[in-house]
Amino acid sequence: MAEFLILLYSILMTKVFSGIRPSGKLHLGNYLGAIKNWIELQDKAEQAIFAVVDLHGITTPYDPAAYKQQVMDVILDYLAAGIDPDKSLLIRQSKIPQHTELAWIFNTITPVSWLERLPNYREKVEQVEQSGDKNAKSYQNNLSILAYPVLMAADILLYKSNLVPVGEDQLLHLNLTNEVGAKFNHVFGEVFPNVKTHLATGARIMSLQDPTKKMSKTGDDGIALSDEPDIIRAKFKKATTDSGKEVKFDQENKAGISNLLTIYSLLAKKEMRDIEKEYEGKNYGDFKSDLAEVTVNFLKPFQQKREEYQKDMSQVEAILENSEEKARHLAEQTMKEVREKMGI
Ligand code: TRP
């Protein structure tokens, strides 16, 4: 009985937070690796907040003229994918100024050495150097790439969130979040909870061009949730596979076809074994064109819903404003505690 109550309590008291940078339209990897989980969590959690982290997005080169639209594209993707504004708050990070206030405060207790050792930081610096963007120079070695995870810790802890659904690549950032929160509690007094990571189950979707890299938003690498059917067909046709013939899951030797099989199995909700059986004696071409149809069909209701929202942007604005106002209120409650503990 006691155990049951503890379990019930921990589900009811769950406060979920997650975010995605607005660096382009969301793709199948974002959906299967993250958002699908968010939608399940929003039904159970006491509080669920999903953000477009636009202040993270400006730490690497971007186009100011296109940025507002990019943010809105992700918001539309969230809504169309099933994030329900009656259950969750949908926010633009920059509309809640407490994120940056708490980040600054966390800067005062975060040793630079904690940040320098993070591999994501090193990768980002390299990416910017190699990006060829005309502004890349002014982004090299900038403070915000280094401080990126401090702002992320602030995003999460500002709402006293205790469950963060993210991909594996964010695990070290979550560790840092807990280190920073614990240090604050130790130095100034107890404010922040411990945060648990919720890893997406069995979904790491890779690039269609280079199956050793994560699916990204560029070129033919990924299927955007809003891609037209013919674009989807063309992208799968061009997807990298090995020189073999057999449609078989073999991560090590057949990374390309294995990635496509994973997508097929998740979208069609079929067991890998059954799909392999179905394609015995058939070739990659047959499999790819069927996968394209499975994907087109899967995305149809999503795309219809997205179009409906797009036709009524004033409704979308209203949803955002309502969510952001509630978020500011929650944020201010935490900040009052923080400022008081710090004597500011
Ligand atoms: N760092 C995350 C990424 O690159 C994005 C992010 C920012 C985030 N703040 C967050 C994710 C808070 C979860 C919680 O994907």
Image (cartoon, helix red, strand yellow):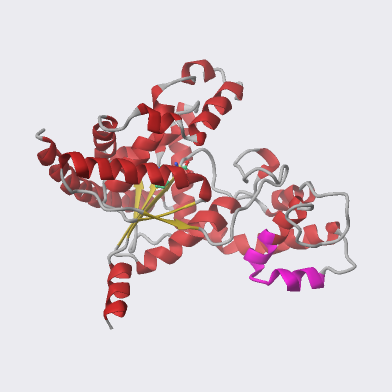
The magenta segment is: 262-278
Q: Is residue 253 above or below residue 68?
A: below
Give the image quarter of residue 220.
top right
Residue 227 vs residue 106, the one in the foreground: 106
Residue 130 vs residue 199: left or right?
right
How far from the left and from the top, in percent, is residue 148? Answer: 40, 33
* Rendered residue at 63%/50% (across/down): 227
How far from the left and from the top, in percent, is residue 137? Answer: 52, 16
- Total number of numbered labels? 0
Q: Main secondary structure of the magenta part?
A: helix
Residue 306 vs residue 270: left or right?
left
Quadrant where the N terminus is found in the figure: bottom left
The quadrant of the rendered image in which ligand 1 is seen is top left
How far from the left and from the top, in percent, is residue 271? Answer: 68, 72
How far from the left and from the top, in percent, is residue 73? Answer: 48, 45
Give the image quarter of residue 267.
bottom right
Asked if the magenta segment contains residue 182, the reply would be: no
Residue 318 vs residue 264: left or right?
left
Q: Is residue 85 something that shows in the picture?
A: yes
Asked if the magenta segment contains residue 275, the reply would be: yes
Quadrant where the C terminus is found in the figure: top left
Q: Is residue 310 something that shows in the picture?
A: no
Residue 146 vs residue 286, the one in the foreground: 146
Residue 176 vs residue 284, the one in the foreground: 176
Residue 321 vs residue 344: left or right?
right
Give the image quarter of residue 285.
bottom right
Residue furthest to the bottom in view is 1
